[in-house]
């Protein structure tokens, strides 16, 4: 077992515990997604050996190259897609991932519903909100969220919650608070928010899933 990986994992879990306690929450309410994108099997395996089982990838093709072999050894590993998904990759994503975090448009909802119906496997779904109204980022506009949720419900997608990436270089708390408000308004419990630099803030504001890569694996490969 890689001792450094185990130490980093323990430190991140400790920080999540402290942030949850500060907010009057149980640490068990927060799931740590280890973002293994751009890291190879040799880097991922020590984290699995340390007992962690929840991982996130950005691209379907990269995950296809790494995770079938890893899941042979660790069949209880859970894999989440956190990056933007092209509609033509929907079937591949449904086959491989246990949750999809970046659903942001009606065409993708339709593609995922068709893939779920064909394959018979149903990953959890998160709607990504462009919380900072940034044109370069994925996610639906806040004003479009009700219609997109209606479309997901009509298509039979199991929507677990909302996801966001706040603007870089700005205080993230107001954006996390807004996402939490939107989730409450629509009766959703899941909040996928917070990354290596701000996950503690996200936990204090209700995150149920934090996406941590650099703080766990080091700089990307």
Image: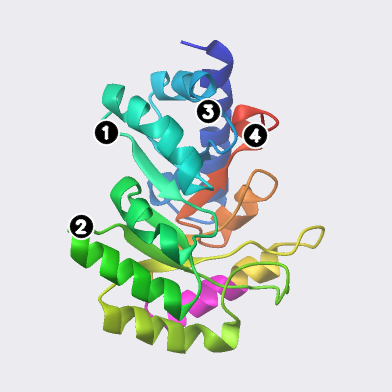
> Is 66 part of what is drawn in magenta?
no
The part of the image, by quadrant, that contains residue 14 is top right
Query: Which mark is drawn over residue 9?
Result: 3
Q: Position of residue 38 (x, y in %)?
A: 60, 35
Q: Nearer the observer, disc 2 or disc 1?
A: 2
The part of the image, by quadrant, that contains residue 76 is top left
Q: Nearer the observer, disc 3 or disc 1?
A: 1
Helix, strand or loop under label 4: helix
Query: Which mark is drawn over residue 76?
Result: 1
Q: Position of residue 208 (x, y in %)?
A: 45, 56
Circle nearer the N terminus (3, 1) = 3
Q: CA distance from mark 4 to mark 3?
A: 9 Å
| Span shown in magenta | 178-187
For the stretch drawn in magenta, the main secondary structure is: helix
Q: Position of residue 125 (x, y in %)?
A: 37, 64
The residue sitting at 44% across, 83% down in the picture is 148
Q: CA distance from mark 2 to mark 1?
A: 20 Å
Circle nearer the N terminus (2, 3) = 3
Q: Nearer the observer, disc 4 or disc 2?
A: 2
Helix, strand or loop under label 2: helix
Circle 4 sits on which residue? 215
Circle 2 sits on which residue? 119
Q: CA distance from mark 1 to mark 4?
A: 23 Å
Instruction: Indicate left or right for 56 with 171 as reference.
Output: left
Query: Which mark is drawn over residue 24?
Result: none
Q: Can residue 158 be seen here?
A: no
The reply to whether discs 1 and 4 touch (Cβ–Cβ < 8 Å) is no
Q: CA distance from mark 3 to mark 1?
A: 18 Å
Q: Which is nearer the eye, 14 or 170?
A: 170
Q: CA distance from mark 4 to mark 2?
A: 35 Å
Circle nearer the N terminus (4, 3) = 3
């Amino acid at each position: 077992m890689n001792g450094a990986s185990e130490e980093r994992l323990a430190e991140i879990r400790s920080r999540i515990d402290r942030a949850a306690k500060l907010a009057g929450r149980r640490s068990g309410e927060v799931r740590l997604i280890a973002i293994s994108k751009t890291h190879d099997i040799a880097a991922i395996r020590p984290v699995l050996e340390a007992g962690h089982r929840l991982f996130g990838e950005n691209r379907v093709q990269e995950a296809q190259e790494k995770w079938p072999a890893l899941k042979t050894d660790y069949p209880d590993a859970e894999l989440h897609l956190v990056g933007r998904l092209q509609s033509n990759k929907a079937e591949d994503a449904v086959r491989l991932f246990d949750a999809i975090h970046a659903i942001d448009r009606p065409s993708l909802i339709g593609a995922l519903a068709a893939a779920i119906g064909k394959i018979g496997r149903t990953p959890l779904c998160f709607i990504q909100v462009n919380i900072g109204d940034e044109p370069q980022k994925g996610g639906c506009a806040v004003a479009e969220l009700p219609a997109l949720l209606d479309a997901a419900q009509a298509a039979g997608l199991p929507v677990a919650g909302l996801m966001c990436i706040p603007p870089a270089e700005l205080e993230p708390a107001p954006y996390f608070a807004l996402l939490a408000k939107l989730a409450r308004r629509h009766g959703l419990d899941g909040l996928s928010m917070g990354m290596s630099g701000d996950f503690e803030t996200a936990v204090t504001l209700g995150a149920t899933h934090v996406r941590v890569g650099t703080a766990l694996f080091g700089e990307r490969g």
